Amino acid sequence: MVYWNAFKELMEIPLYWLDVAQREIDAASEEKRFYGSNWRQYYLVRPAPERLHDLRVVFLHGGGWQFGSPESFRHHAQVFNQLGFEVILPSFRRLPSHHYGHMREDLGLLMQALWRDAAVPIIIGGVSAGGHLASLFASDVDLQGQAGWNQSWIKGVFTLCAPLTLEELPWPGLRKRLTNGGKAGLIDRADPIRLVRQALDIPFLCLHGQKDGLVPSASVIPYVEERIRLGAADQTHFHLFPDQGHLDLARWALDNEKARKLLLHWVRQLPQ
């Protein structure tokens, strides 16, 4: 059943991107800023029409660590803009030319750039591969120390259809490329569940679909269970949608009202 769901969702991806491309999003007030010398090392700053919060939302795009772009996820940012949040949409180096070691460097450079840019706390999250990177941004305290980042500046982490236990991801070739051939040290840094105990004090929301064929629920449930086992139950919010797949959650900002309501309710409850 998982493989049938995967095949079905892979066939639906072009239709998803076509739908996204047809939706007009105003980018007139948007600003592009670079945090490194590579053409992928940049982020978009999308101001709110009326800024109501000091917190900024950092949203990392999905695409299997190899596709997608900040520009194609403007509609996700727009939802937070309408709530009065300034939104940051980062780009990062990606497969197949790069691996997580390079992405981790990008996360560190991004930390430095964001704090230089505006010394305000953030909420960070993302869809699919972006949610994976968001969880590592929040939990890699060694990287934070190197970048001069204080973990207390992160007020919440959210993931949608994101892999949080790489061993349960049914794409061994992709996992191998992500970790540069399966290097032990890089696996330890690239797998969120191996760093889970380093971010227990941060409020965490995970939304996932039981019918996800690209990132099965088995790749998130161990992470959630480990947070709870380690004493972070009050800071852990998990919702598994029984009838939704990967692209259903990816559509939270388009037409998935159930997921959107849960996410925005959680955001509103965070300490400002």
Image (spheres, helix red, strand yellow):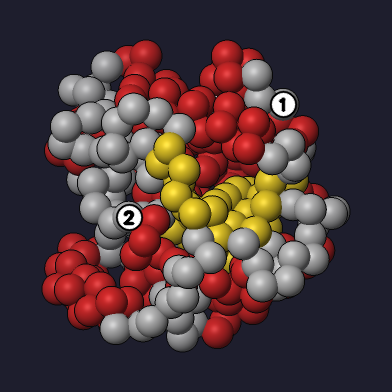
**Residue at the location (74% across, 52% down)?**
55
14 shown above or below 130: below
**Residue at the location (66% across, 25% down)?**
149
What is the x, y in percent for residue 47? 62, 62
| Label 2 crowd (10 A; few <14 / some 14-19 / many >=20) | some
Compared across the picture, whether 148 is left or right of 175 comes to right
Quadrant location, the N terminus: bottom left
**Residue at the location (65% across, 59% down)?**
86
Mark 1 — residue?
150
What's the mark number on residue 40?
none
**As shown in the figure, which amino acid type bears the numbered disc 2?**
Ser
What is the x, y in percent for residue 90? 45, 46
Gap in Å between the C-alphas at discs 2 and 1? 27 Å
Residue closer to the observer: 224 or 115: 115
Closest to the camera, between mark 2 and mark 1, is 2
Mark 2 — residue?
69
Q: Secondary structure at mark 1?
A: loop
Residue closer to the observer: 207 or 150: 150
Q: Are marks 2 and 1 in contact (CB under 8 Å)?
A: no
